[in-house]
Amino acid sequence: MPHPKNPNVIDGLASIRAARRAGETGHGRKLKTRPSQTRLPDADTPPEGSERTIASRIGSTAVPPRHDLLCYECGYAFVVRGRIQKPICPKCHCSLAMDDLCIRGEWAGDVKTIGSVEITTDGRITEGSIVARDLVLEGDARGGRLRVGRRLELGARARYSPRQTTFRDMRIRPGARITLRHKVSCRNLDIEGRLKASVTCEGMVRIKAGGVLEGALHAPHLEVEEGGGLRATIKVQPHDPP
């Protein structure tokens, strides 16, 4: 209520009554307020869509493994993602064996698998054929035919017949000292031991620490790690763009 002597001055009791009347509606009911429905994020919780939440989602997502397979019956190449249980060629519908085998001592026979085969240092193939996705050769396989769908790995005592061996990639294992008198043609080459040969590659040549290449090299891409050696005639020429 204005002061009786000064209408521009409001006393304390009048201000309290005015505040009470301001909290009431015209019908004498108090106004009801609703709590805010927007919840503020916690201090340790990043807001949705931020870089931290995107990174956490990416880190927790498991990418299924990729398997590049080659049917040993019709030669069709296909890809399988995730766990392989009962592989079947999508072209010829052949059920494929996927066993990993290890051959020791003298051996003769035929093997077909989309798994890996290892021939140990005392292993010797006298006759027959081996068809596998990967082949680790530590012994003597000159008496058999080798058809490797992906990578051939050569150990210290590896011996094979170049006329009876096909592969896509080659790896020289650590500690191996390999001399190949025939020309080597492959897709990719990884050298972790010593290789003396004339090599032509379609993809990447990697000479890793402790690896040495002697002879001749023709490839579109070459990578030499620190500690790797190269004593060869080199021609590095990338493929022409289409």
Image: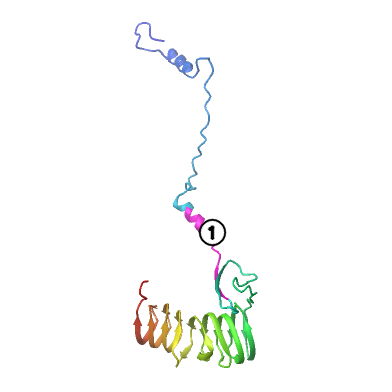
Q: Is residue 217 left or right of residue 135?
A: left
> Does 158 appear in magenta?
no
Corner quadrant of residue 91: bottom right
The one nearer the camera, 4 or 211, is 211
Q: Residue sitting at 58 percent across and 66 percent down? A: 82
Q: Nearer the viewer, residue 28 or 134?
A: 134
* Color encoding of the figure: rainbow
Asked if residue 79 is positioned above or below residue 156 in the image, the reply reads above
- Identify the residue shown where x is 51% and y is 59%: 59
Query: In the picture, which quadrant includes the N terminus?
Result: top left
Which quarter of the figure is the C terminus placed in? bottom left
Q: Position of residue 64 (x, y in %)?
A: 56, 64
Point out the residue furthest to the front here. 92
Q: Which residue carries the number 1 mark? A: 61
Establish if 21 lies above or below 165: above
The secondary element bearing badge 1 is classed as: loop
Q: Residue 120 in the image: x percent, y percent?
A: 58, 87
Q: Can residue 170 be seen by looking at this rendering?
A: yes
**Residue type at numbered disc 1:** Thr
Side (left or right) of 175 relative to 80: left
Whole-percent x, y for residue 21 in the image: 48, 15
Tell me if residue 157 can be seen.
Answer: no
In the image, is residue 100 above or below residue 176? Answer: above
Seen from the viewer's position, the closer of residues 111 and 9 is: 111
The image shows residue 172 at horizontal and vertical percentages of: 48, 84
**Residue 66 sits inside the magenta stretch:** yes
Q: Say above or below: 110 vs 65.
A: below
Residue range corresponding to the magenta coloring: 54-70
Near mark 1 (Cα within 10 A), the count class, few <14, some 14-19 or many ≥20, is few
Residue drawn at x 53%, y 87% as measured from the top left: 165
